[in-house]
Image: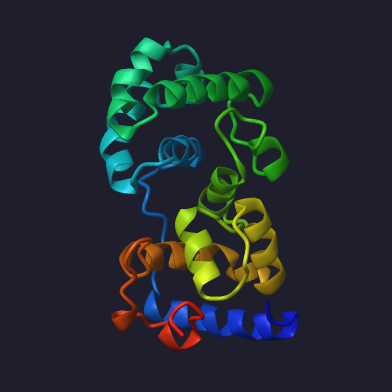
Amino acid sequence: MASRSVLKNRARKIVAALAAAYPEVECELAFRNAFEILVATILSAQCTDKKVNQATPALFRKFPTPSKMAQATPAQIEPLVHSLGLFKNKAKNLIAAARMLTDEFNGEIPANMEELVRLPGVGRKTANCVLVNAFHQPGIMCDTHCCRVSKRLGLHDLDDPVKIEAALAELLPRETWGDFSHRIILHGRRVCHSRKPECEICPLEKLCEYYH
């Protein structure tokens, strides 16, 4: 890998190029509050945001709060999330997380990493998604797109999402973390695909180690 100073310079250019390519970005999961973005992100594991957005309106009509969801049974949740894959595990985690929120947090969504990752079904990626989108705090959302694209761009040579998050945090100014995450995820979805990246239309071509 290049020296840290070289990597920081590359990261600065990548942040600028992504901002130019995707000036307006926001979370593609539909939500109205912190509880809804938490639930939607848990459901988004190995599933597209589009499919999650199709399922959550009915789910939130029946279970709009942690206290309501805490009283649900798997048999009530599973049909509502069946189309999203891993539905049994997701339903179990939603109920368990809702119960913890009700019992330990008075139904409020905690606004810090340490408490969020205690919730069933919540890892650092999900926690960062909640922090960025619900609480407007800095966070790097290391999903599969972020991990893949940032590696191809030569910002790291890692595979573990937690280590990638730490590496990117060292290279990027804190105030850019949230928008950078949204943009690099969007770029991974639209251009830098897993199997066949569209390098010929990529606005980051000149900065990309994978391409060169």
Q: In this view, does 57 lie above or below 96?
A: below
Q: Which colour scheme is used?
A: rainbow
Tell how many labels.
0
Q: Is residue 49 left or right of residue 167?
A: left
Q: Residue furthest bottom?
A: 206
Front residue of 73 and 142: 142
Q: In this view, does 91 lie to the left or right of 107?
A: left
Front residue of 210 and 32: 210
Front residue of 96 and 48: 48
- Residue 139, position in %: x, y? 61, 57
Q: In this view, does 65 lie above or below 126?
A: above
* Residue at 56 percent of width and 48 percent of height: 125
* Residue at 27 percent of width and 30 percent of height: 83
Q: In this view, does 123 lie to the left or right of 17?
A: right
Q: In this view, does 81 lie above or below 177?
A: above
* Residue at 47 percent of width and 36 percent of height: 42
* Residue at 51 percent of width and 24 percent of height: 93
- Residue 209, position in %: x, y? 51, 80
In which quadrant of the rendered image does the N terminus lie?
bottom right
- Residue 84, position in %: x, y? 32, 33
Give the image quarter of residue 31: top left
Q: Is residue 121 left or right of residue 168?
A: left
Give the image quarter of residue 60: top left
- Residue 154, position in %: x, y? 57, 75
